[in-house]
Image: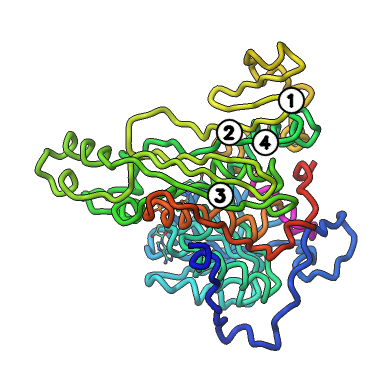
Amino acid sequence: MESDVNRRDALKLGAGVGAGAVLPALAQGQQTEEGIESADPRLKPIPRVRVGMVGIGGRGFHLLRLLLGQPHVEVKAVCDLLEDRCQLAQKATVSAGQQKPDAYFPDDRAFEKLCERDDLDLVVTATPWRWHVPVCVAAMKNGHHAATEVPAAVTLDECWQMVETAEQTGRHCVMLENCCYGRTEMMVLNMVRQGLLGELIHGEAGYMHELREDRELLGADQEVRWRLEHMIHRDGNLYPTHGLGPVAQCMNINRGDQFDYLVSMSSLSRGLNVHYASRFGAKHPLATRKYKLGDVNTTMIRTKLGRTITVGHDTQLPRPYTRINMVQGTHGIVQGYPDQIALESNSHGHSWEPIDKFQSKYEHPLWKKLIKEAQGKGHGGMDFMEIHRLIECLTSGTEPDMDVYDAAAWSAIADLSERSVAKRSQTIDVPDFTRGRWKKNRPLGIIGG
Ligand SMILES: NC(=O)c1ccc[n+]([C@@H]2O[C@H](COP(=O)([O-])OP(=O)(O)OC[C@H]3O[C@@H](n4cnc5c(N)ncnc54)[C@H](O)[C@@H]3O)[C@@H](O)[C@H]2O)c1
């Protein structure tokens, strides 16, 4: 089993990066102070970030508007399969006072032409999952930084491809995990960094989000859309990064600790059949067909330092939303939905208190500074915060808060969980994408504080 997962196919990079252009492995954890020159080509400040945007669906359009709201961003090109989505993006860009961006459509490789432009700094991807890595790789091979929606990759091979391309081209590849910028998540990171919870021992995370009515599943004519395809053909923890990202940051994954191995188990699958039967009738093909994805998946990860993390995935049964957001240490525990905390120093940790009580002391500095600007700008403001930080890091020449190793390690949990589920919950090793550098990498600070 181990050898299967840790086997790394030799990746052949395309003509854009010849053997002579291969850069030394990137130095990790060398976060520079603003204004200080760095030898790392990834950390050259970009005064005005010229963006190409690929995938202008619900999420892509939202990201585009957030990008247009940033003072140091210029949107130069947009791409989608659909011309009308490109036109919408062009219109929004012109309304924001910028030149009309060039549009690339209609085939699913049109993004390659966009990436070939030499007047871009950053390509942002909000396509369906299967295109994230192809777009990021094309961007990096053409010398642009890449940012992708979640999960960054579907397969383990794609994770390696992303890591190796970032290393060989010397470009950033950032996964836009907006949940790491939630107000509570950032306050908890701040609490953890200040030692309030003691040494971290355990975390619980999840994506527990009823998606049965979601438009990513079915089109207007009941055609199966991209996300439902994944539910038909895959069984595991398909969307791990929203819950896992913030916990992984608290636990210094890739920067002092590392995922070691996991086991994963899925329940039977009933939710979609029952739902479509009640919506379209018991004989409807959507009600009678087989869906591979178990209704509830539970994945357990153990880290090299011996911490444990559970990651849930639960999208096809009726239920309220939660990402759980639990971290537990030697001095206390925090959990979300509702946000609450129990500390040994208060009632021996036997009763919960609302986390708001601690807000004045532990509110994250970024939220203190930008709370008014963030208001109303996506998922309680965290979407604004992630785009603000991405652009701030690029313009100031600092290391982004999430790097390609985070993108790979967090996204890989999906593929690895599928492998475990397929083998009666067998133990599966998590590859070390940093190739040992996690032991020396400096822990992430409190992010932009
Ligand atoms: N971070 C978040 O909170 C969040 C929320 C929603 C969606 N997402 C992620 O955003 C991504 C997009 O989700 P969505 O809801 O916008 O989906 P969507 O189906 O609404 O939009 C996808 C768009 O990509 C276009 N597209 C498909 N293949 C393409 C290709 N090869 N080249 C260019 N364009 C292509 C489609 O035409 C469509 O306009 C997914 O990865 C999803 O997981 C993240």
N-term-proximal mark, 4 vs 1: 4
| Kind of residue at badge 3 | Arg
- Residue 139 drawn in magenta: no
Compute the Cα span from label 3 to label 4. 39 Å
Residue visible at 16% across and 38% down in the picture? 277
Q: Which residue: 56% across, 78% down?
A: 116
Q: Is residue 345 above or below residue 395?
A: above
Q: Position of residue 5 (x, y in %)?
A: 51, 64
Q: Mark 2 highlights which residue?
A: 325
Name the secondary structure under disc 2: loop
Which mark is in front, 3 or 4?
A: 4
- Most extreme residue toward the left is 283
Position of residue 20 measured from the top left corner of the image (x, y, whole percent): 70, 88
Residue 65's disc is: 3
Residue at the disc numbered 4:
201
Which sits earlier in the primary sequence, circle 3 or circle 1? Answer: 3
Some atom of ligand 1 lies within 8 Å of the CB belonging to the residue at label 4: no
Quarter of the image where one finds residue 407: bottom right
- The amino acid pointed to by label 4 is Ile
**Of helix, strand and loop, which mostly describes the magenta segment?**
helix
Foreground of the two, 52 or 357: 357
Q: Nearer the viewer, mark 2 or mark 1?
A: 1
Magenta residues span: 386-400
Q: Quadrant for ligand 1?
A: bottom left
